[in-house]
Image (cartoon, rainbow, N blue to C red):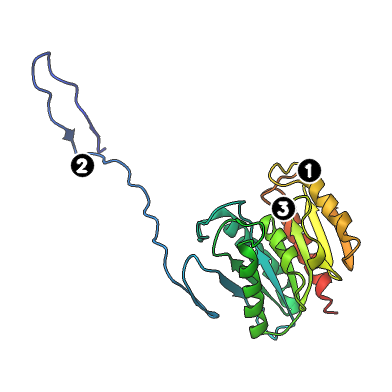
Amino acid sequence: MCRWGWPRSGRAGSPSRSWRTSCRPPPTAPRRPIRPALRYERHEEGRWEVGRPSIDRIDNGGPTRAAVLVLHGGTQRSASPVHRGNLSWRRAAALQRALAARIGSEGIDVWLLRYGQRGWNNLDDPAPVPDARWALTQMKQYADVPIALVGHSMGARTGARIADDSLVRGLVALAPWFPPGEPVSGLKEKDLVVAHGRRDRITSYAASQEFVRRCEQVARTTEFVDRGPVGHYLLRDVTAWNDLAASRALQMLELD
């Protein structure tokens, strides 16, 4: 068997003997993985630089009858660009795939927006909102069909701001970030479903309930779903989160 190791030192005052191995070179320190550099990304819908919004589409494989736009989470303040290593984007990408697998056969394309910046940043001019409106424009240029929004955390807050678009039918908000006083006017005559877990320590279960109560005065329909003892990141009971998002989005689109 091949063996290697450092031999013991010689007597006091004598030089140490050198490395000894029967068939292997000395071990080297483990190398850190090299992260790929941020690059231009190519999509069917065009070319954008990192630091600007981009959009991905999972095609249903046939005629497009409707669409879903998935909006990922973020943070309160950060001008850092969103890249494919960001966990919030990766969770949303997994949700996009799950939705496409569940409702794509109904003629529904599922789109995923990647914001230019990670943060909400400005109370008066939130960074993700113009990115999301840009995404809606891209979707309408591809197919002029009804749209349902599915947002997680900051993505749900973004969705509530852009739901006033004429083609948007409603918003499915998963563990949303709805601070006190968040505007509800964008959901006028729209469908709203809010799902929140009681163990969420990032966004407020109670604030979500209050947001739904306020929307009852303006929205077409409202629903609050108590997800029980689950947290914020959609990591526990993933199938139930995905099933809920798919079923409610399909209801909003009214394709039957």
Disc 2 residue type (three-letter): Pro
Tell me residue 177's x, y (percent): 72, 53
Q: Earlier in the sequence, mark 1 or mark 3?
A: 3
Q: Which of 26 and 34 is in front in this view?
A: 34
Q: Is residue 191 visible?
A: yes
Tag 3–tag 2 contact (CB < 8 Å): no
The residue tagged 3 is 177
Tell me residue 206's x, y (percent): 81, 45
Closer to viewer: mark 3 or mark 2:
3
Disc 1 residue type (three-letter): Arg
Who's the residue at 62% across and 51% down the image? 76
Q: Nearer the viewer, residue 197 or 6?
A: 197
Q: Residue furthest left?
A: 14
Residues at marks 1 and 2, CA–CA distance in whole angstroms: 55 Å
Near mark 1 (Cα within 10 A), the count class, few <14, some 14-19 or many ≥20, is some
Apparent side of residue 179 relative to residue 85 in the rendered image (left or right): right
Determine the image quadrant of residue 189.
bottom right
Q: In this view, does 215 lie above or below 19?
A: below
The residue tagged 1 is 198
Q: In this view, does 88 lie above or below 132?
A: above
Disc 3 residue type (three-letter): Trp
Residues at marks 1 and 3, CA–CA distance in whole angstroms: 14 Å
Determine the image quadrant of residue 119.
bottom right
Q: What element carries label 1?
A: loop
Q: What element carries label 2?
A: loop
Near mark 2 (Cα within 10 A), the count class, few <14, some 14-19 or many ≥20, is few
The residue tagged 2 is 25
Q: Is residue 177 above or below residue 127?
A: above
Q: Which of marks 1 and 2 is nearer the N terminus?
A: 2
Tell me residue 164's x, y (percent): 77, 72
